[in-house]
Image: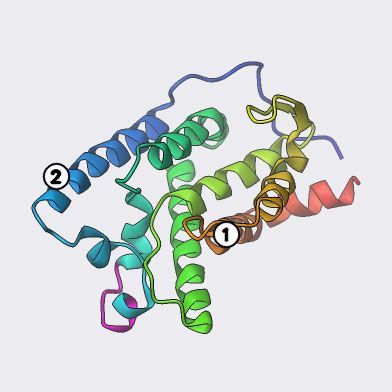
């Protein structure tokens, strides 16, 4: 069948909810820096960890997605750049309320999956970042507009949107992974997005 989602060319600009999420993450990052300098264990309290959740810090699968590494701004910058690039077009189609609900569900769902995976693997260290939610957004974009061409930055080659997520994971595997990158969190965001967008998944699979 034909794609029932229409989209004009070019970037939609900074849509309202995307803008609010970017501002919130930026402000929280600055607060993280300030609080950590004061000795406040922000990551231990708010990043998702098996120890924290098992000891009653049940908010961690929610709060972890608003934190980013304070060692370098690139963790925050790359996530927010991806959100701006792909989230605005989803918000234009869905509206701000549905977009925010989808973003939160992907992030929280990924947080729960991270906790369960780390519990199973007996990995105690905390995980933080919006990547689970961001991968949910990327998945949604690739399902709604599978034939749209995306120009990659590294390497600078054109790619059909439907192959974007598989390529990202292939690159992670090719690079041998990184202990600072939560691949299971990325997969969690993709998995939750796929559940939330079952009809789109079936449509894309059905026409190929």
- The disc placed on residue 34 is 2
Q: In this view, does 206 lie to the left or right of 65?
A: right
- Residue that carries the numbered disc 1 in the rendered image: 183
Residue closest to the eye, 53 or 153: 153
Stretch of the chain drawn in magenta: 53-59
Q: Which of 14 and 187 is in front in this view?
A: 187
Residue at 48 percent of width and 76 percent of height? 118
Q: Please state which of residues 2 and 157 is positioned toward the viewer in this rendering.
A: 157
Q: Which of marks 2 and 1 is nearer the N terminus?
A: 2
Q: Where is residue 164 in the image (x, y as percent from the top left)?
A: 71, 40
Q: Which structural element holds mark 1?
A: helix
Expressed as whole percent of the image width and height from the top left, the position of residue 8 reads 65, 18
Query: Do the residues bearing badges 2 and 1 touch, measured as CB atoms within 8 Å?
Result: no
* Looking at the image, residue 127 lies above or below residue 84: below
Query: In the image, is residue 9 above or below residue 180?
Result: above
Q: Is residue 56 within the magenta segment?
A: yes
Q: Is the magenta stretch mostly helix, strand or loop?
A: loop
Position of residue 87 in the picture relative to residue 50 (left or right): right
Picture residue at 51% right of the left edge, 45% below the top: 134
Label 1 Cα neighbours within 10 Å, binned few <14 / some 14-19 / many ≥20: some
Compared across the picture, whether 45 is left or right of 50 comes to: left
The circle on residue 43 is none
Q: How is the image coloured?
A: rainbow
Q: Residue at x 37, y 66 (%)?
A: 126
């Amino acid at each position: 069948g034909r794609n029932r989602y229409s989209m004009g060319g070019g970037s939609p600009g900074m849509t309202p909810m995307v803008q609010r999420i970017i501002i919130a993450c930026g402000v929280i990052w600055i607060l993280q820096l300030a609080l950590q300098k004061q000795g406040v264990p922000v990551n231990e309290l708010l990043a998702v960890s098996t120890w924290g959740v098992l000891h009653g810090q049940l908010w961690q699968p929610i709060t972890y997605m608003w934190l980013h590494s304070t060692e370098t701004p690139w963790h925050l910058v790359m996530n927010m750049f991806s959100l701006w690039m792909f989230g605005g077009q989803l918000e234009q189609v869905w509206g701000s309320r549905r977009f925010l609900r989808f973003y939160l569900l992907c992030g929280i769902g990924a947080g729960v999956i991270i906790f369960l995976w780390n519990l199973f693997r007996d990995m105690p260290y905390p995980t933080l970042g919006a990547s689970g939610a961001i991968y949910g957004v990327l998945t949604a974009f690739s399902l709604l507009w599978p034939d749209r061409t995306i120009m990659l930055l590294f390497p600078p080659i054109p790619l059909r949107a439907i192959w974007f997520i598989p390529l990202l994971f292939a690159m992670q595997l090719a690079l041998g992974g990184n202990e600072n990158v939560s691949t299971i969190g990325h997969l969690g965001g993709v998995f939750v997005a796929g559940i939330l967008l079952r009809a789109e998944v079936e449509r894309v699979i059905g026409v190929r």
